[in-house]
Amino acid sequence: MSTFFTVTKKELQDHFNSWRFMVLLFVILAAITYIFFAAGNIKSAATGASDFIFLSLFTATAIQTSTSLIPSSFLSLMAVLLPVAGIILGLDAINSERNNGTLSRLVSQPIYRDNIINAKFTAGIITIAIVLLTIVLLVSAMGLRMLGVPPSIEEIWRLFFFLVIGIIYGGFWLGLAILFSTLFKQVAVSAIVTIAVWLFFVVFYPIIYISIANMISSSTQAEAIKNAEMVINLTRLSPIQLFNESMAVLLIPQMRSASQLLQIFSTDAGNYLLTTPLSLAQSLIAVWSQITISIVLTTVCFALSYIKFMFEEIRSL
Amino acid sequence: MVMIETNQLTKVYGHTTVVDNVNLKIDEGHIFGFLGPNGAGKTTTILMLLGLTSPTSGTAHISGFDSTREALKVKRIAGYIPERVGFYNDMSAKQNLEYTANLNGIFGQKANQGVSKALEDVGLKDRAEEVVAHFSKGMKQRLAIADILVKQPKVAFLDEPTTGIDPAGITQILDLISHIAKSNNMTIVMSSHQLSQIQRVCSHVGIMSKGHLISAGSIEQLSKQAGDNKVVIEIQLAEATADIVEAIKNLPGVIGVEGETNSLNITCNEDLRRQISKVISDKGGLITQMKLQSYALEDVYMKILKGA
Ligand SMILES: Nc1ncnc2c1ncn2[C@@H]1O[C@H](COP(=O)(O)OP(=O)(O)OP(=O)(O)O)[C@@H](O)[C@H]1O
Ligand SMILES: [Mg+2]
């Protein structure tokens, strides 16, 4: 067994024994309760949907709210909870060990430094995967009882890709949190900065691109499409938007990605297309670029953590 | 055999040279004391030797391995107790050491035995299952020594292992250090601000100040270099009669005798322990303890401290 597995194992044990896991458990319970209380709404919405009844369990509006800050469906709940999980698991990965004086001891053992970061990331990803899988299974079980309709094979596949993308999304925030924990010596600072970045994308970034969209005036249709495209690309700089878009396309088969919609409208290809669901392969192709960008973003977080951590001098004070 | 060797080892931070062309050689099995005031560059030198920071210029080798280019090999044979050593507070002493064992490729039964043995050696066997958060500073320091023993290294670097520990604890730790060095044939480098502690366990010493290695060698050698060879011999007698004191005073080479009741401090030109014990036994006295102290080295060190 290599040192990588040794560290991963220890980090996993840490996660499962710590207050973080208690927080995550609480989050799971909250999610389940949420679905439970919204059961009535979901049931009526689900039975209204023609195909893909099972999937509508995850996407149906469960609670009508007037503010966009309260997640209205399971999917939007996950869009909030996954970053929280990633941030909680990663926010003190390196700096707490540094402050504790354990990092000095750890790096003086025969272990490559990149293994330390890799192992911490892997343990976080495994924890996120376990939590997400548990939530999806619990919701599915509840859905089975409520609806009495089992998922189709395609729905299972779509749920599987939902899991994969959800884990990548959680992984991005985990990577970002680990990066800040290597950059800042104090846990409080790295935590605040990570949360600030998240809040920026949740609250302020939409304000920015909405005002930009409002400012642009376009006289011709071609110009309007060009401007719309620009705004769409702007929204894609936000990891939250990337997640929302790819999730919606995967779990709502009728859904096209924003840029596809634009194409459809601009070519006048017809409104009927909008009502036919995409095949799984078409949906995947539609979200491929979003997935790639998410992975690239996560990799960038890593590269930066490595550069900072690999050659850094680690003193015990 | 040379175990630790540096060649023109230099570290520069910004515009300050913190370690300046240090050439050091430490033989296998020696306990080497690294003396110097705050900021002398001791920790930085140790970090470069362990491959935890890279030298600006020059080289460091441990057991023939280059500390920078073969850092992993060096870390396999070298143990390290940092200045402010830490453990995972929510894990037990045993779990902490088992983690170290695993990181060094020791698993299962073998790890278990190694950990138990190490905890026993440092006197923490009864506290093995206890969470480290409850440990005192002294216990943590002993746990750190156990942490090194688990690894069975050839060389160990102990950075100020006695700071923040009470006098009884210091004695315990210093005894432990001499003991593990002997029983494992380990080469030990131990840094400290205090000459008295270094003199108690180290055979060799290096004095560092402002990044320069001012002198290095065996303690006797350095005392001689330091100029006059005045030594003070401390003895404890069962009964110090006036007769005995008079006889000692008359020995050639003895400069002065002072002391109260049964303990005497004898200042002499050279190490006269043999002659003194002979005189005492001739007069029918009984020596219960005898210790040699060289103040010459202390003078040198004090001068360096004042200059710093
Ligand atoms: N990362 C750094 N950047 C700049 N200067 C540093 C850095 N680390 C240490 N120094 C300086 O290097 C000098 C030597 O430090 P070092 O820790 O090696 O001394 P030391 O002999 O171990 O002292 P002490 O007895 O206080 O532990 C100090 O003056 C310190 O301020
Ligand atoms: Mg130091």
Image (spheres, coloured by chain):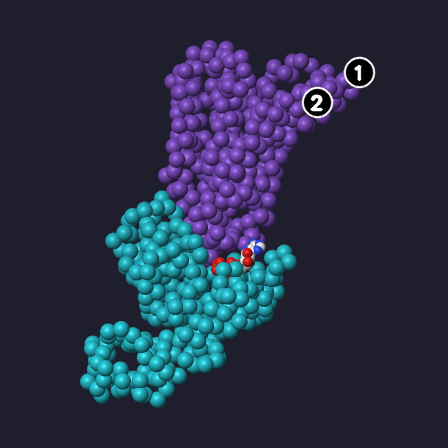
Residue B50 shows up from this direction = no
Mark 2: amino acid: Ile
- Disc 1: which residue: A219
The three-letter amino acid code for the residue at tag 1 is Ser
Give the class, few, some or many, for how many residues have Cα within 10 Å of label 2's Cα (few <14, many ≥20): few
Spot occupied by residue A269 in the image (x, y as percentages of width and height):
71, 17
Chain assignment, label 1? A
Asked whether residue B56 appears in the rendered view, the answer is yes
Query: Which label belongs to residue A212?
Result: 2
Location of residue B272 with respect to A73 vertically, above or below: below
Q: Is mark 2 within 8 Å of ligand 1?
A: no
Quick one: SS at disc 1? loop
x and y percentages locating residue A73 in the rendered image: 50, 19
Q: CA distance from mark 1 to mark 2?
A: 16 Å
SS type, badge 2: helix
| Colour of chain A in the image | purple
Q: A26 and A118: which one is in front?
A: A26
Residue, x 40% and y 46% (percent of image)?
A10
Image quadrant assignment for residue B179: bottom left
Q: Quadrant of residue B249?
A: bottom left
At 47% from the left edge and 68% from the top edge, which residue is drawn? Answer: B302
Q: Which chain is cyan?
A: B
